[in-house]
């Protein structure tokens, strides 16, 4: 099997060296291997950063956005993204352990029915390629979400798909910094 290069600042194409320097600074001195992988295709790295910035402005709360990302990573079998989003969820948004365990194990979120509906809707979007059907959409809306939220789930899934599929394609190793969250 051909191995992908996980770029460092030194090995990266010139056009993305500055991006990797910024990422390293913003991440406490390390570059997540996903970023090193995407540096092989500068347009993929640019897409990841651009769509990620847009996703952070969407109509979902930070916790809801992470529910979408972790649910997608688990559904798509991306161990790297599960670890990365678990670390982010603990460190940046203080997501509680019960919610994280439920998301990682694909079990019901008994403590928050609305987030449980969001996770189920996210799985439906992925498994049906967006053709969730009237009942799933109605359940989502009845839980208190909006049509805007539904489209922002699709946005989050699109971002997750880029990352999950790239990591799955390359079998991206999990950074030592993320291993405790794997």
Image: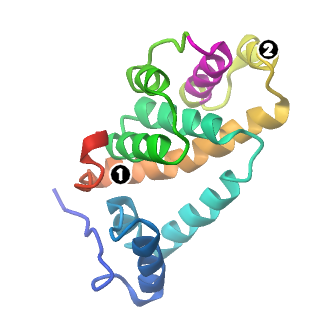
The answer to which quarter of the image holds residue 122 is top right
| Residue 175 vs residue 4, the one in the foreground | 175
Q: Is residue 126 left or right of residue 180?
A: right
Q: Which residue is mark 2?
A: 138
Q: Which residue is mark 1?
A: 167
Residue 81 magenta = no
The correct choice, above or below, for 50 with respect to 144 in the image is below
Write the residue at 66% across / 31% down: 130
Tag 1–tag 2 contact (CB < 8 Å): no
> Residue lying furthest left in this view?
1
Q: Is residue 1 left or right of residue 77?
A: left
On the image, the x and y values in percent for residue 99 come to 49, 23
The correct choice, above or below, for 176 with respect to 109 in the image is below
On the image, the x and y values in percent for residue 92 come to 52, 48
Mark 1 or mark 2: whose residue is earlier in sequence: 2
- What is the C-alpha distance between the residues marked 1 and 2? 33 Å
Give SS at disc 2: helix
Part of the protein shown in magenta: 111-125
Q: Is residue 41 visible?
A: no
Write the residue at 50% across / 35% down: 72
Q: Is residue 105 visible?
A: yes
Instruction: Please tell me how many numbered marks the rendered image carries.
Output: 2
The answer to which quarter of the image holds residue 129 is top right
């Amino acid at each position: 099997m051909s191995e992908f290069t996980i770029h460092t600042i030194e090995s990266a194409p010139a056009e993305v060296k500055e991006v990797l320097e910024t990422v390293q600074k913003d991440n406490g001195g390390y570059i997540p291997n996903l970023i090193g992988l995407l540096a092989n295709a500068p347009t993929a790295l640019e897409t990841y950063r651009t769509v990620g910035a847009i996703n952070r402005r969407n109509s979902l709360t930070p916790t809801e956005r992470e529910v979408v990302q972790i649910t997608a990573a688990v559904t798509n079998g991306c161990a790297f993204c599960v670890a990365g989003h678990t670390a982010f969820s603990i460190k940046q948004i203080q997501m509680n352990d019960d919610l994280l365990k439920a998301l990682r194990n694909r079990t019901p979120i008994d403590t928050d029915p609305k987030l449980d509906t969001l996770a189920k809707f996210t799985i439906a979007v992925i498994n049906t390629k967006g053709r969730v059907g009237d009942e799933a959409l109605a359940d989502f809306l009845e839980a208190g979400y909006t049509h805007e939220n539904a489209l922002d789930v699709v946005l989050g899934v699109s971002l997750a798909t880029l990352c999950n599929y790239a990591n799955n394609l390359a079998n991206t190793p999990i950074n030592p910094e993320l291993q405790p969250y794997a």
